[in-house]
Amino acid sequence: MIAVIDYDAGNLTSVARAVSHLGFSCVVTRDREAIQRAERVIFPGVGAAGAAMASLRRLGLDRSLEAAFEAGTPILGICLGTQVILGHSEENDTPCMGIIPGEVRAFPGDLRTEKGQPLKIPHMGWNRVHLKKPHPLLADIQETDEFYFVHGYYPAPADPKWVVGETDYGILFVSAMGKKNLFATQFHPEKSGRPGLSILRRFCVWDGTWEGGTC
Amino acid sequence: MLSKRIIPCLDVRDGKTTKGIRFKENVDIGDPVDMARHYYETGADEIVFYDITASHEKRNIMIDVVRRVAETIFIPFSVGGGIRSVEDMRAVLLAGAEKVSVNSAAVRDPSVISKGAAAFGSQCIVLGMDVLHVGEKPGILSGYEIVIDGGRTPMGMDALQWAREGERLGAGEICLNAIDADGTREGYELTLTAMISENVGIPVIASGGAGEPGHLADVLTRGKADAALIASMVHYGTYTIPEIKDYLDRQGIKVRRTW
Protein backbone atom coordinates (compact mmCIF):
# COMPACT_ATOMS: atom_id res chain seq x y z
CA MET A 1 0.00 0.00 0.00
CA ILE A 2 1.14 3.52 -0.86
CA ALA A 3 0.45 6.21 1.76
CA VAL A 4 -0.13 9.78 0.59
CA ILE A 5 0.52 12.00 3.60
CA ASP A 6 -2.45 14.24 4.45
CA TYR A 7 -1.46 17.35 6.42
CA ASP A 8 -3.97 19.98 5.27
CA ALA A 9 -1.61 21.16 2.52
CA GLY A 10 -3.58 21.70 -0.64
CA ASN A 11 -4.59 19.37 -3.41
CA LEU A 12 -3.72 15.85 -2.22
CA THR A 13 -6.39 14.14 -4.26
CA SER A 14 -4.71 14.77 -7.61
CA VAL A 15 -1.64 12.67 -6.80
CA ALA A 16 -3.84 9.90 -5.38
CA ARG A 17 -5.94 10.02 -8.56
CA ALA A 18 -2.85 9.72 -10.75
CA VAL A 19 -1.54 6.73 -8.74
CA SER A 20 -4.94 5.00 -9.00
CA HIS A 21 -5.01 5.71 -12.74
CA LEU A 22 -1.69 3.84 -13.00
CA GLY A 23 -3.32 0.82 -11.34
CA PHE A 24 -1.75 1.06 -7.87
CA SER A 25 -3.73 1.35 -4.67
CA CYS A 26 -3.05 4.19 -2.29
CA VAL A 27 -4.56 5.76 0.77
CA VAL A 28 -4.57 9.45 1.73
CA THR A 29 -3.85 9.39 5.44
CA ARG A 30 -2.61 11.24 8.51
CA ASP A 31 -2.40 8.07 10.58
CA ARG A 32 1.20 7.78 11.88
CA GLU A 33 1.19 4.00 12.10
CA ALA A 34 -0.25 3.62 8.61
CA ILE A 35 2.55 5.81 7.27
CA GLN A 36 5.26 3.82 9.06
CA ARG A 37 3.74 0.55 7.86
CA ALA A 38 3.30 1.70 4.24
CA GLU A 39 5.38 0.08 1.49
CA ARG A 40 6.02 3.53 0.07
CA VAL A 41 5.13 7.09 0.97
CA ILE A 42 4.21 10.11 -1.16
CA PHE A 43 4.69 13.49 0.50
CA PRO A 44 2.91 16.14 -1.61
CA GLY A 45 1.76 19.62 -0.70
CA VAL A 46 0.78 23.04 -1.94
CA GLY A 47 0.79 26.16 0.22
CA ALA A 48 3.12 27.94 2.62
CA ALA A 49 6.05 26.37 4.48
CA GLY A 50 5.15 27.87 7.87
CA ALA A 51 1.62 26.45 7.99
CA ALA A 52 2.81 23.13 6.54
CA MET A 53 5.52 22.59 9.19
CA ALA A 54 3.09 23.61 11.96
CA SER A 55 0.58 21.01 10.71
CA LEU A 56 3.23 18.30 10.34
CA ARG A 57 4.51 18.88 13.90
CA ARG A 58 1.03 19.08 15.42
CA LEU A 59 0.09 15.77 13.78
CA GLY A 60 3.47 14.18 14.57
CA LEU A 61 3.91 13.41 10.87
CA ASP A 62 7.42 14.90 10.66
CA ARG A 63 8.64 12.09 12.93
CA SER A 64 6.68 9.45 10.97
CA LEU A 65 8.32 10.61 7.77
CA GLU A 66 11.80 10.60 9.35
CA ALA A 67 11.16 7.09 10.69
CA ALA A 68 10.02 5.89 7.26
CA PHE A 69 13.16 7.40 5.71
CA GLU A 70 15.42 5.72 8.27
CA ALA A 71 13.63 2.41 7.68
CA GLY A 72 14.46 2.58 3.96
CA THR A 73 10.85 3.06 2.77
CA PRO A 74 10.79 4.61 -0.72
CA ILE A 75 9.59 8.23 -0.35
CA LEU A 76 8.55 10.69 -3.06
CA GLY A 77 8.40 14.39 -2.16
CA ILE A 78 6.47 16.80 -4.38
CA CYS A 79 6.58 20.62 -4.45
CA LEU A 80 6.05 21.91 -0.89
CA GLY A 81 6.72 18.38 0.41
CA THR A 82 10.11 18.56 -1.29
CA GLN A 83 10.88 21.96 0.21
CA VAL A 84 10.16 21.09 3.84
CA ILE A 85 12.44 18.03 3.57
CA LEU A 86 15.31 20.56 3.57
CA GLY A 87 16.63 22.21 6.74
CA HIS A 88 15.16 25.69 6.56
CA SER A 89 12.82 27.79 4.38
CA GLU A 90 13.01 31.52 3.79
CA GLU A 91 9.22 31.37 3.46
CA ASN A 92 7.92 32.49 6.86
CA ASP A 93 11.54 31.93 8.14
CA THR A 94 10.58 28.32 8.88
CA PRO A 95 12.81 25.64 10.43
CA CYS A 96 12.07 22.47 8.41
CA MET A 97 12.80 18.75 8.69
CA GLY A 98 16.39 18.60 7.48
CA ILE A 99 16.32 15.08 6.04
CA ILE A 100 18.44 16.65 3.30
CA PRO A 101 20.55 19.54 4.65
CA GLY A 102 19.97 22.79 2.80
CA GLU A 103 17.83 25.88 2.29
CA VAL A 104 14.62 26.84 0.54
CA ARG A 105 15.12 30.26 -1.06
CA ALA A 106 12.79 32.87 -2.56
CA PHE A 107 13.26 33.64 -6.25
CA PRO A 108 14.87 37.09 -6.50
CA GLY A 109 12.38 39.76 -7.63
CA ASP A 110 14.41 40.94 -10.62
CA LEU A 111 14.75 37.73 -12.66
CA ARG A 112 15.13 38.18 -16.41
CA THR A 113 15.37 35.97 -19.48
CA GLU A 114 18.64 35.87 -21.40
CA LYS A 115 16.98 38.42 -23.74
CA GLY A 116 16.44 40.73 -20.78
CA GLN A 117 12.69 40.32 -20.40
CA PRO A 118 11.36 40.35 -16.82
CA LEU A 119 10.19 37.00 -15.41
CA LYS A 120 7.10 36.66 -13.26
CA ILE A 121 6.83 35.05 -9.87
CA PRO A 122 5.54 32.45 -9.15
CA HIS A 123 7.34 30.29 -11.69
CA MET A 124 4.14 28.83 -13.17
CA GLY A 125 3.96 26.52 -16.16
CA TRP A 126 6.02 23.98 -18.10
CA ASN A 127 9.80 23.80 -18.00
CA ARG A 128 12.61 21.32 -18.62
CA VAL A 129 14.70 19.39 -16.11
CA HIS A 130 18.38 19.04 -17.01
CA LEU A 131 19.62 15.78 -15.54
CA LYS A 132 22.84 16.06 -13.52
CA LYS A 133 23.07 12.34 -12.83
CA PRO A 134 21.03 9.23 -13.59
CA HIS A 135 18.23 8.20 -11.24
CA PRO A 136 16.08 5.06 -11.62
CA LEU A 137 12.83 7.06 -11.39
CA LEU A 138 13.94 9.22 -14.34
CA ALA A 139 14.99 6.35 -16.61
CA ASP A 140 12.33 7.20 -19.25
CA ILE A 141 12.87 10.97 -19.21
CA GLN A 142 14.23 12.74 -22.30
CA GLU A 143 16.05 16.07 -22.19
CA THR A 144 13.18 17.71 -24.15
CA ASP A 145 10.44 16.53 -21.74
CA GLU A 146 8.78 19.27 -19.71
CA PHE A 147 7.13 19.29 -16.31
CA TYR A 148 4.51 21.48 -14.60
CA PHE A 149 5.78 23.86 -11.94
CA VAL A 150 4.05 26.37 -9.69
CA HIS A 151 6.19 27.88 -6.91
CA GLY A 152 7.77 31.08 -5.63
CA TYR A 153 10.54 29.40 -3.59
CA TYR A 154 13.10 26.84 -4.72
CA PRO A 155 15.17 24.05 -3.11
CA ALA A 156 18.90 24.63 -2.54
CA PRO A 157 20.41 21.46 -1.02
CA ALA A 158 23.71 22.03 0.78
CA ASP A 159 25.73 19.50 -1.24
CA PRO A 160 25.67 18.89 -5.02
CA LYS A 161 25.72 15.14 -4.36
CA TRP A 162 21.94 15.32 -3.72
CA VAL A 163 21.22 17.20 -6.95
CA VAL A 164 19.56 15.06 -9.63
CA GLY A 165 18.13 17.71 -11.95
CA GLU A 166 18.19 21.47 -12.51
CA THR A 167 15.80 23.92 -14.18
CA ASP A 168 16.43 27.33 -15.72
CA TYR A 169 14.19 30.22 -14.67
CA GLY A 170 16.51 33.20 -14.91
CA ILE A 171 18.70 31.28 -12.46
CA LEU A 172 19.44 27.56 -12.41
CA PHE A 173 17.67 25.94 -9.47
CA VAL A 174 17.44 22.36 -8.21
CA SER A 175 14.20 20.81 -9.47
CA ALA A 176 14.90 17.16 -8.57
CA MET A 177 16.95 15.83 -5.68
CA GLY A 178 17.60 12.48 -4.07
CA LYS A 179 19.11 10.88 -1.00
CA LYS A 180 19.12 7.09 -0.65
CA ASN A 181 15.46 5.96 -0.66
CA LEU A 182 14.13 9.52 -0.92
CA PHE A 183 13.42 11.23 -4.25
CA ALA A 184 11.91 14.71 -4.40
CA THR A 185 10.76 17.02 -7.17
CA GLN A 186 9.86 20.71 -7.22
CA PHE A 187 7.54 20.06 -10.17
CA HIS A 188 4.25 18.16 -10.07
CA PRO A 189 4.63 14.71 -11.72
CA GLU A 190 0.89 14.14 -11.23
CA LYS A 191 0.16 17.18 -13.44
CA SER A 192 2.94 16.70 -16.00
CA GLY A 193 1.29 14.35 -18.48
CA ARG A 194 3.19 11.33 -19.86
CA PRO A 195 6.68 12.05 -18.44
CA GLY A 196 5.24 12.83 -15.00
CA LEU A 197 3.17 9.65 -14.96
CA SER A 198 6.28 7.68 -15.92
CA ILE A 199 8.07 8.96 -12.79
CA LEU A 200 5.05 8.01 -10.64
CA ARG A 201 4.81 4.57 -12.27
CA ARG A 202 8.49 3.90 -11.60
CA PHE A 203 8.13 5.13 -8.02
CA CYS A 204 5.24 2.69 -7.47
CA VAL A 205 7.61 -0.25 -8.11
CA TRP A 206 10.90 1.29 -6.86
CA ASP A 207 12.83 -0.66 -4.23
CA GLY A 208 14.42 2.52 -2.86
CA THR A 209 17.94 1.88 -4.08
CA TRP A 210 19.95 4.44 -6.05
CA GLU A 211 23.56 3.94 -7.12
CA GLY A 212 24.30 7.66 -6.78
CA GLY A 213 22.57 8.01 -3.43
CA THR A 214 24.61 5.88 -1.07
CA CYS A 215 26.71 8.73 0.30
CA MET B 1 13.26 28.25 -19.81
CA LEU B 2 9.52 28.42 -19.17
CA SER B 3 7.28 27.59 -22.12
CA LYS B 4 4.39 29.76 -23.25
CA ARG B 5 1.17 27.87 -22.52
CA ILE B 6 -1.51 27.01 -25.10
CA ILE B 7 -4.84 26.55 -23.34
CA PRO B 8 -8.04 25.30 -25.00
CA CYS B 9 -11.15 26.75 -23.39
CA LEU B 10 -14.35 24.75 -23.18
CA ASP B 11 -17.61 26.55 -22.46
CA VAL B 12 -19.87 24.04 -20.72
CA ARG B 13 -23.63 24.38 -20.43
CA ASP B 14 -25.73 21.69 -18.71
CA GLY B 15 -22.80 19.25 -19.03
CA LYS B 16 -22.19 19.81 -22.78
CA THR B 17 -19.49 21.84 -24.50
CA THR B 18 -20.95 24.81 -26.34
CA LYS B 19 -19.64 27.69 -28.40
CA GLY B 20 -21.15 31.13 -28.93
CA ILE B 21 -20.10 34.46 -30.35
CA ARG B 22 -19.86 37.38 -27.96
CA PHE B 23 -21.66 35.22 -25.37
CA LYS B 24 -24.68 34.69 -27.67
CA GLU B 25 -26.03 32.06 -30.08
CA ASN B 26 -24.66 29.01 -28.27
CA VAL B 27 -24.65 25.58 -29.96
CA ASP B 28 -23.56 22.25 -28.44
CA ILE B 29 -20.31 20.90 -29.90
CA GLY B 30 -19.45 17.83 -27.82
CA ASP B 31 -18.79 16.06 -24.53
CA PRO B 32 -16.38 18.03 -22.31
CA VAL B 33 -14.62 14.94 -20.94
CA ASP B 34 -13.98 13.50 -24.43
CA MET B 35 -12.78 16.88 -25.68
CA ALA B 36 -10.51 17.34 -22.65
CA ARG B 37 -8.97 13.90 -23.25
CA HIS B 38 -8.38 14.75 -26.90
CA TYR B 39 -6.66 18.05 -26.07
CA TYR B 40 -4.62 16.41 -23.28
CA GLU B 41 -3.39 13.74 -25.71
CA THR B 42 -2.53 16.28 -28.41
CA GLY B 43 -0.40 18.63 -26.32
CA ALA B 44 -2.64 21.13 -24.51
CA ASP B 45 -0.63 22.67 -21.65
CA GLU B 46 -3.68 23.29 -19.50
CA ILE B 47 -7.46 23.32 -20.02
CA VAL B 48 -10.00 25.93 -18.95
CA PHE B 49 -13.64 25.02 -18.35
CA TYR B 50 -16.11 27.82 -18.20
CA ASP B 51 -19.51 26.83 -16.80
CA ILE B 52 -22.22 28.88 -18.47
CA THR B 53 -25.07 26.83 -17.01
CA ALA B 54 -27.78 29.36 -16.38
CA SER B 55 -29.32 27.90 -13.26
CA HIS B 56 -27.45 27.53 -9.98
CA GLU B 57 -29.45 24.34 -9.24
CA LYS B 58 -27.65 22.53 -12.07
CA ARG B 59 -24.15 23.17 -10.68
CA ASN B 60 -23.84 19.54 -9.56
CA ILE B 61 -23.74 18.60 -13.28
CA MET B 62 -20.54 20.65 -13.62
CA ILE B 63 -19.02 19.14 -10.47
CA ASP B 64 -19.57 15.69 -11.99
CA VAL B 65 -17.86 16.83 -15.23
CA VAL B 66 -14.90 18.13 -13.17
CA ARG B 67 -14.61 14.83 -11.32
CA ARG B 68 -14.60 12.82 -14.56
CA VAL B 69 -12.08 15.18 -16.18
CA ALA B 70 -9.77 14.82 -13.17
CA GLU B 71 -9.76 11.03 -13.59
CA THR B 72 -8.93 11.37 -17.28
CA ILE B 73 -6.29 14.07 -17.78
CA PHE B 74 -3.04 14.66 -15.89
CA ILE B 75 -2.30 18.28 -16.66
CA PRO B 76 -3.65 21.30 -14.75
CA PHE B 77 -7.16 22.52 -15.45
CA SER B 78 -9.24 25.36 -14.12
CA VAL B 79 -12.94 25.91 -13.72
CA GLY B 80 -14.77 29.24 -13.86
CA GLY B 81 -18.28 30.51 -14.24
CA GLY B 82 -20.73 30.95 -11.40
CA ILE B 83 -18.04 30.75 -8.68
CA ARG B 84 -19.41 33.07 -5.97
CA SER B 85 -17.93 31.92 -2.68
CA VAL B 86 -15.17 29.97 -0.95
CA GLU B 87 -17.65 27.06 -0.76
CA ASP B 88 -18.10 27.10 -4.55
CA MET B 89 -14.30 27.11 -4.90
CA ARG B 90 -13.89 24.24 -2.48
CA ALA B 91 -16.41 22.11 -4.40
CA VAL B 92 -14.55 22.35 -7.73
CA LEU B 93 -11.08 22.02 -6.16
CA LEU B 94 -12.13 18.91 -4.21
CA ALA B 95 -13.60 17.49 -7.42
CA GLY B 96 -10.07 17.70 -8.86
CA ALA B 97 -9.60 21.10 -10.54
CA GLU B 98 -6.20 22.73 -10.06
CA LYS B 99 -7.49 26.31 -10.15
CA VAL B 100 -10.74 28.23 -9.95
CA SER B 101 -11.48 31.47 -11.69
CA VAL B 102 -13.68 34.23 -10.33
CA ASN B 103 -15.05 37.03 -12.46
CA SER B 104 -18.36 38.82 -11.81
CA ALA B 105 -18.52 37.71 -8.17
CA ALA B 106 -15.08 39.24 -7.50
CA VAL B 107 -16.16 42.56 -9.02
CA ARG B 108 -19.21 42.61 -6.77
CA ASP B 109 -17.25 41.46 -3.70
CA PRO B 110 -13.43 41.61 -4.09
CA SER B 111 -12.94 39.85 -0.74
CA VAL B 112 -13.79 36.55 -2.45
CA ILE B 113 -10.28 36.73 -3.99
CA SER B 114 -8.48 37.20 -0.67
CA LYS B 115 -10.66 34.63 1.09
CA GLY B 116 -10.00 32.09 -1.67
CA ALA B 117 -6.26 32.79 -1.64
CA ALA B 118 -6.14 32.42 2.16
CA ALA B 119 -8.06 29.14 2.05
CA PHE B 120 -6.39 27.43 -0.93
CA GLY B 121 -3.31 29.50 -1.88
CA SER B 122 -2.88 32.16 -4.57
CA GLN B 123 -1.80 29.53 -7.11
CA CYS B 124 -5.42 28.29 -7.12
CA ILE B 125 -7.10 31.64 -7.73
CA VAL B 126 -7.44 33.02 -11.25
CA LEU B 127 -9.01 36.45 -11.70
CA GLY B 128 -11.13 36.39 -14.84
CA MET B 129 -11.65 39.84 -16.35
CA ASP B 130 -14.08 40.73 -19.16
CA VAL B 131 -12.90 44.00 -20.65
CA LEU B 132 -14.40 46.44 -23.16
CA HIS B 133 -12.53 49.22 -24.99
CA VAL B 134 -14.39 52.45 -24.21
CA GLY B 135 -11.73 55.11 -24.77
CA GLU B 136 -10.54 57.46 -22.08
CA LYS B 137 -13.32 58.79 -19.86
CA PRO B 138 -13.70 59.79 -16.20
CA GLY B 139 -12.68 56.93 -13.93
CA ILE B 140 -11.42 54.86 -16.91
CA LEU B 141 -7.93 56.26 -17.40
CA SER B 142 -6.61 53.23 -19.29
CA GLY B 143 -9.49 53.40 -21.79
CA TYR B 144 -10.56 49.86 -20.89
CA GLU B 145 -13.58 49.16 -18.72
CA ILE B 146 -14.59 46.10 -16.69
CA VAL B 147 -17.91 44.53 -17.70
CA ILE B 148 -19.65 41.63 -15.95
CA ASP B 149 -22.52 39.19 -16.39
CA GLY B 150 -21.15 37.84 -19.66
CA GLY B 151 -20.30 41.24 -21.07
CA ARG B 152 -23.68 42.87 -20.50
CA THR B 153 -23.07 45.15 -17.52
CA PRO B 154 -20.42 47.93 -17.59
CA MET B 155 -19.10 48.59 -14.09
CA GLY B 156 -17.39 51.97 -14.42
CA MET B 157 -14.15 50.30 -13.25
CA ASP B 158 -10.78 50.75 -14.91
CA ALA B 159 -9.39 47.41 -16.15
CA LEU B 160 -5.76 48.19 -15.27
CA GLN B 161 -6.63 49.31 -11.75
CA TRP B 162 -8.76 46.20 -11.24
CA ALA B 163 -5.93 43.92 -12.45
CA ARG B 164 -3.53 45.48 -9.94
CA GLU B 165 -6.13 45.28 -7.18
CA GLY B 166 -6.76 41.61 -7.99
CA GLU B 167 -3.04 40.88 -7.70
CA ARG B 168 -2.85 42.76 -4.39
CA LEU B 169 -5.80 40.74 -3.05
CA GLY B 170 -4.01 37.48 -3.82
CA ALA B 171 -4.99 36.33 -7.32
CA GLY B 172 -2.22 34.09 -8.70
CA GLU B 173 -3.00 34.64 -12.36
CA ILE B 174 -5.22 36.77 -14.61
CA CYS B 175 -7.32 35.48 -17.49
CA LEU B 176 -7.95 38.54 -19.61
CA ASN B 177 -10.88 38.35 -22.02
CA ALA B 178 -11.30 41.17 -24.54
CA ILE B 179 -15.03 41.35 -25.29
CA ASP B 180 -14.46 43.29 -28.53
CA ALA B 181 -12.30 40.47 -29.93
CA ASP B 182 -14.14 37.48 -28.43
CA GLY B 183 -15.45 35.09 -31.10
CA THR B 184 -14.28 37.25 -34.00
CA ARG B 185 -11.21 35.09 -34.93
CA GLU B 186 -9.53 38.31 -36.01
CA GLY B 187 -6.76 38.33 -33.42
CA TYR B 188 -6.24 39.08 -29.73
CA GLU B 189 -6.45 42.60 -28.30
CA LEU B 190 -2.69 43.23 -28.19
CA THR B 191 -2.70 46.73 -26.69
CA LEU B 192 -4.87 45.72 -23.75
CA THR B 193 -2.97 42.48 -23.13
CA ALA B 194 0.46 44.13 -23.16
CA MET B 195 -0.73 46.94 -20.89
CA ILE B 196 -2.08 44.54 -18.26
CA SER B 197 0.79 42.04 -18.51
CA GLU B 198 3.50 44.71 -18.14
CA ASN B 199 1.83 46.20 -15.09
CA VAL B 200 1.25 43.12 -12.93
CA GLY B 201 3.73 40.63 -11.51
CA ILE B 202 1.52 37.57 -12.04
CA PRO B 203 1.03 35.58 -15.27
CA VAL B 204 -1.57 36.79 -17.78
CA ILE B 205 -3.58 34.46 -20.05
CA ALA B 206 -4.82 36.27 -23.17
CA SER B 207 -8.35 35.40 -24.27
CA GLY B 208 -10.63 36.36 -27.13
CA GLY B 209 -10.04 36.62 -30.86
CA ALA B 210 -7.77 33.67 -31.75
CA GLY B 211 -8.38 32.56 -35.35
CA GLU B 212 -4.98 31.47 -36.68
CA PRO B 213 -1.54 30.55 -35.27
CA GLY B 214 -0.13 33.98 -36.15
CA HIS B 215 -2.56 35.53 -33.66
CA LEU B 216 -1.02 33.46 -30.87
CA ALA B 217 2.48 34.44 -31.96
CA ASP B 218 1.46 38.11 -31.81
CA VAL B 219 -0.08 37.97 -28.35
CA LEU B 220 2.77 35.89 -26.88
CA THR B 221 5.38 38.38 -28.17
CA ARG B 222 3.98 41.89 -28.73
CA GLY B 223 1.07 41.25 -26.35
CA LYS B 224 3.50 40.05 -23.61
CA ALA B 225 1.07 37.28 -22.62
CA ASP B 226 2.30 34.25 -20.66
CA ALA B 227 -0.36 31.98 -22.13
CA ALA B 228 -2.98 32.05 -24.87
CA LEU B 229 -6.54 30.76 -24.69
CA ILE B 230 -7.96 29.16 -27.83
CA ALA B 231 -11.43 27.85 -28.63
CA SER B 232 -13.12 27.72 -32.04
CA MET B 233 -9.86 27.45 -34.00
CA VAL B 234 -9.33 24.00 -32.49
CA HIS B 235 -12.91 22.99 -31.60
CA TYR B 236 -13.92 22.86 -35.27
CA GLY B 237 -10.73 21.15 -36.43
CA THR B 238 -9.42 24.17 -38.36
CA TYR B 239 -6.09 23.73 -36.58
CA THR B 240 -4.62 21.15 -34.22
CA ILE B 241 -2.54 22.04 -31.17
CA PRO B 242 0.59 20.37 -32.68
CA GLU B 243 0.16 22.51 -35.81
CA ILE B 244 -0.10 25.65 -33.68
CA LYS B 245 2.94 24.66 -31.63
CA ASP B 246 4.98 23.83 -34.75
CA TYR B 247 4.20 27.31 -36.06
CA LEU B 248 5.11 29.03 -32.77
CA ASP B 249 8.32 27.01 -32.54
CA ARG B 250 9.32 28.16 -36.03
CA GLN B 251 8.71 31.75 -34.88
CA GLY B 252 11.24 31.19 -32.08
CA ILE B 253 8.60 31.09 -29.33
CA LYS B 254 9.36 28.53 -26.61
CA VAL B 255 6.53 25.97 -26.35
CA ARG B 256 6.32 22.45 -24.92
CA ARG B 257 6.99 20.05 -27.80
CA THR B 258 6.90 16.59 -26.22
CA TRP B 259 4.06 15.07 -24.23
Image (tube, coloured by chain):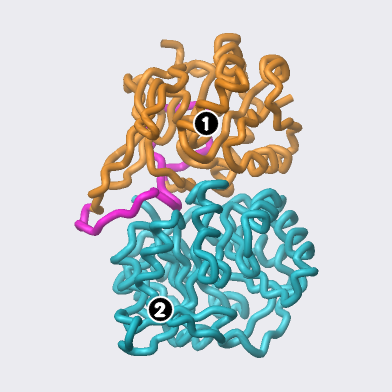
Chain colours: A orange, B cyan
What mark, if any, has residue B85 been given in the picture? Answer: none
- Tell me the residue that label 1 is attached to: A52
- Mark 2, chain letter? B
> Viewed as shown, does residue A193 lie left or right of B51?
left
Residue B99 at what x, y percent from top left? 57, 55
Residue B143 at what x, y percent from top left? 33, 84
> Viewed as shown, does residue A211 lie left or right of A199?
left
Q: Main secondary structure of the magenta part?
A: loop
Q: Residue at x 55, y 36 (%)?
A: A45
- Tell me the residue that label 2 is attached to: B215
Which mark lies nearer to you, 1 or 2?
Answer: 1
Q: Quadrant of residue A163?
A: top left
Q: Would residue B211 be seen by someone viewing this image from the given angle?
A: no
Q: Residue at x 29, y 66 (%)?
A: B198
Q: Magenta segment range? A: A114-143
Residue B212: in magenta span:
no
Residue A140: in magenta span:
yes
Say what amino acid the circle numbered 2 marks: His
